[in-house]
Image: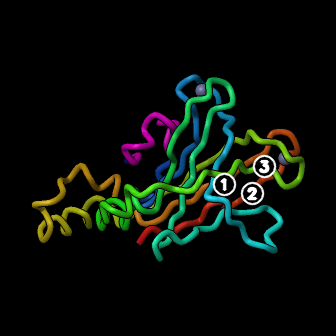
Amino acid sequence: MLPRHLVNCLSHNVNRLDDFRFETDFICRCGSTLFRWYTVGRYGESDPFRRPLSILIEGKPCFRIENECIKCNHRCLVFDSQIHGWNGFICRNEHLARISRPTLDLWKCTVCFAAGQSARIGIASEGESDFNEFLQSFGDRFNPDDWVDAFGWIHISLRCPDCKTDIPGWVDYETM
Ligand SMILES: [Zn+2]
Ligand SMILES: [Zn+2]
């Protein structure tokens, strides 16, 4: 049930909450669980945790998160709103998916300024059977395996190992 682009970035020890939601931890293929986090560089002005927000590119929202392992520097594209999830995968606009993104901004803990946090992801979708119903109308474009990439919501919470700050809902993004 992991989105295919995250199979090598997440623990396969998944906590499946029900047919529609699961949670798991980010873990690098080298075993490290600490990552530098990159965003498109816009944050809520009064948000003490600087949770990332989307920007507009050609009038459309662009929200992108990447991470980079602090041990082996493996980089992972965690989420791009024009590439992943319902809008980015199922309703993809190939032009918007390909246009260049701004230089990403390294996020730092707002309490201790460290860059290198562990994180947990939550994904919600309409479920596999609902996707199979959807395929009856649009089956020529997608196949049943695609349901894992058609998720409708992504949630990421961070934990800073240096100052022990927890940031629930660091990402809380609806993709449809
Ligand atoms: Zn690594
Ligand atoms: Zn910190």
- Label 1, on which residue? 157
Crowdedness near tag 1: few (<14), some (14–19) or many (≥20) residues, C-alpha within 10 Å: some
Q: Earlier in the sequence, mark 2 or mark 3?
A: 3
- Label 2, on which residue? 167
Helix, strand or loop at label 2? It is strand
Q: Is residue 3 magenta?
A: yes
Q: Which residues are magenta?
A: 2-14
For the residue pair 140 and 131, the one nearer the viewer reads as 140
Horizontally, residue 83 falls left or right of residue 153, namely left
> Residue at left 50%, top 45%?
77
> Residue at left 39%, top 48%?
3
Q: Vertical placement of 29 versus 85: above or below?
A: above
Q: Amino acid at mark 3?
A: Lys
Q: Is residue 19 visible?
A: no
Q: Quadrant of the C terminus?
A: bottom left
**Residue 114: x, y in percent?**
83, 42
Q: Are marks 1 and 3 in contact (CB under 8 Å)?
A: no
> Residue at left 58%, top 69%?
55
Q: Amino acid at mark 2?
A: Ile
Horizontally, residue 111 falls left or right of residue 132, namely right
